[in-house]
Image (cartoon, rainbow, N blue to C red):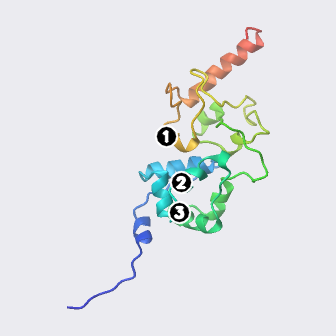
Amino acid sequence: MTLVTTSFSLQSSVELWLLQVESYPNESFGHFLGRFRRANCLSSAHLSAMLGQRSYVVSYWESPSRQRRPSPAQLQQLSQLTGVAISQLQLMWLSSDIPLHWPTRLCPDCYAEAPWHKLTWQRADQPHCAIHQRSLLSKCPRCYHAFQLPSYWAIGQCDRCQFPFAQMRFYQAAAAKSKAQGLI
């Protein structure tokens, strides 16, 4: 009986089973990671473990206010796991000198057109959508609950009242009309 040895890596065998998720234009890093994790049924702690990191590392990356970014080595590993180029992953972050808005914000008009969290919505110096010229929302206009982190946006709706993000634009339009008429 002969013993056959092969070069086998757990990480390379796992990579074969991971579903790849396409990154979207101007998508935030946290939103992308959340979509990747959901597609592969991974928690942030599990993905952290796959990257050889402490259990909280990925959850910190998904929270823009923490300003934690992957190191070059971590980006390399993440690129290998996700199939997304390092340069593309780096585009999902704003420069560290740009102040971020907290809590999470969104433009419901943009979301209706392209359902993902845009990186630019979190810029503290831009309270309005550059495309639609409306105020960015930081809470549901129906129940006034703050939006959860984009990494948790599985369905694209308020996590409290289930009001779809895309339909929030009608509330926003009605409020703008009432304000213009002097009713608010």
* Pointer 1 residue: 154
Per the image, label 2 sits on a secondary structure element best described as loop
Whether residue 26 is visible here, answered yes or no, is no
Name the residue located 72 percent from the left edge and 18 percent from the top edge: 176
Asked whether the residues under the numbered discs 2 and 1 touch, taking CB atoms below 8 Å apart as contact, a structural biologist would say no
**Looking at the image, is mark 3 or mark 1 earlier in the sequence?**
3
Measure how far apart labels 3 and 1 are at the Cα level. Answer: 25 Å
Q: In which quadrant of the rendered image does the N terminus lie? A: bottom left
Badge number at residue 38: none
On screen, 43 above or below 139? below
* Pointer 2 residue: 56
Amino acid under disc 2: Tyr
Amino acid under disc 3: Gln
Measure how far apart labels 3 and 2 are at the Cα level. Answer: 8 Å
Pick whichever, 159 or 92, lies toward us. 159
Counting from the top left corner in percent of width and height, residue 16 is at: 41, 66
Name the residue located 65 percent from the left edge and 57 percent from the top edge: 69
- Mark 3 Cα within 10 Å, few/some/many (few <14, many 20+)? some
Amino acid under disc 1: Ala
- Mark 2 Cα within 10 Å, few/some/many (few <14, many 20+)? some
Counting from the top left corner in percent of width and height, residue 36 is at: 50, 52
Name the residue located 66 percent from the left edge and 62 percent from the top edge: 87
Counting from the top left corner in percent of width and height, residue 146 is at: 60, 30
Q: In which quadrant of the rendered image does the C terminus lie? A: top right
* Pointer 3 residue: 53
On screen, 178 above or below 42? above
Q: Nearer the viewer, mark 2 or mark 1?
A: 2
On screen, 146 above or below 36? above
